[in-house]
Amino acid sequence: MESKFILVLLASTTGAEQCLRIGEQMSARLGQPLRLAHVEIGSRAIILPSQEQLSEYEVEHLAERERMETEKLRATVAQWTRSTGISAQFDLYTGDQWRVMRHYQRTASMVVLAAPHTQPVGHREGLRAALLRARHPVVMVPPTWDGSFGRRLMIGWRDIAPLRRALAAFQPFLAVAEQVEVVAIDQDESALAAARATIAPIVPAAGYRLIASEGRKTATALLEAATAYQADGLIMGAYRRGELLNWLSAGTSSRLIQSSALPLMMRR
C-alpha cells in the first residue's frame, strides 16, 4: 500500500511558489513527503455559456496555452528543488481536475492549492474536486500571501460536522501553533461552551470570542477578525449547506474562498 503524502496541486504558475512553500512546511509538520501535480486542461473540460463547443482556433490556442504553462511550472518546480533540496514527484495529467482527483482519493492526506478564482479558465475546479469528490482536507493559498503559516491560527466556530472534521485533520498544526483564537459570529455563550469542550483538549490556551456581525456578511466579519488578529491560517468547515445550495446562492464558504487574503484550512 502506497504511503500517504501531501499533494500540491499546481493549477498554474500563479500562486505556485506560495503553495510549494506552505506544502514544504506541512510536509515537515506531518512527516509526510510532498507530491506535485498539474493538469493540462483538455478542450472538453471548457464549457462556455455562449456556445456549445470551442472553435478550432480556440482549441489550438488552449492547447498552446496549456503547454506553455506546463513548461513554466516545470521551471518553477526545478528552481524550488534547487533552492530547497526537496525532490518531489511531479505528476502531469491531461483532462480535468475532477477526474484527476480520483487518482489521489486514497493516497493524499491533504491538498494544497491556490485560490481557484485566481487561476486560468479551466483550472478553477481543483478546490471543489478535492473537497467534494476526494473529501480531502484542503489548504487554499491566496497567490498574494507572503506571510508565515500556522503560527497564529483562527478557528471560525460553528458546531457542525465539517468543522469538527477540519479540527481533527489540522490538529497537528493547532497543537504547535503559538496562538489560537476561536471566533463565533452571531452566536451565544452556549456556542463558546461547546467550542471550549471540543478545542480545549487540543489547545488548552486557546482564546474564545463572540463577535456580532452588525449587518455584515458572516464571511466579512470573520475575515475582518482574522486580519485584526493577524492570523496566518483560518480553520473552517466548508459547504455545510451542501454543494447545490452553495451553487444556487453563495454561502459563507463561497464568500470566504472568494475573498480571503490568508490561507484557508478547510474540510467538508
Image: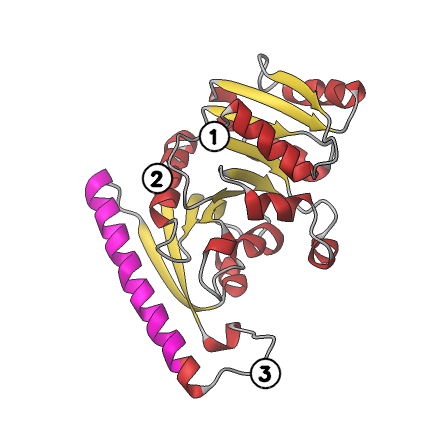
Q: Is residue 197 left or right of residue 16?
A: right
In the rendered structure, which segment of residues is drawn in magenta? 60-85
Comparing 137 with 206, the one in front is 206
Residue marked by disc 1: 232
Whole-percent x, y for residue 167 in the image:
60, 31
Splitting the image into 4 quarters, where does residue 260 fall?
Answer: top right
**What is the distance, in whole Å, between disc 1 and disc 2 at their CAs?**
14 Å
Q: Earlier in the sequence, mark 2 or mark 3?
A: 2
Residue 12 seen in this snapshot: yes
Comparing 201 with 205, the one in front is 205
Q: Which mark is residue 21?
A: 2
**What is the distance, in whole Å, between disc 3 and disc 1 at their CAs?**
43 Å
Q: Earlier in the sequence, mark 3 or mark 1?
A: 3
Whole-percent x, y for residue 61 in the image:
37, 78
The residue that appears at 42% across and 81% down in the rendered structure is 59
The residue that appears at 47% across and 77% down in the rendered structure is 43
In reply to whether residue 194 is colored magenta, the answer given is no
Q: Earlier in the sequence, mark 1 or mark 2?
A: 2
Whole-percent x, y for residue 39 in the image:
42, 63
Residue marked by disc 3: 52
- Tag 2: residue type? Arg
Please tell me whether residue 91 is drawn above or below residue 96 in the rendered image.
above
- Tag 3: residue type? Glu
- Tag 1: residue type? Asp
Tell me the SS state at disc 3. loop
Please tell me whether residue 131 is drawn above or below residue 39 in the rendered image.
above
The C terminus sits in image quarter:
top right
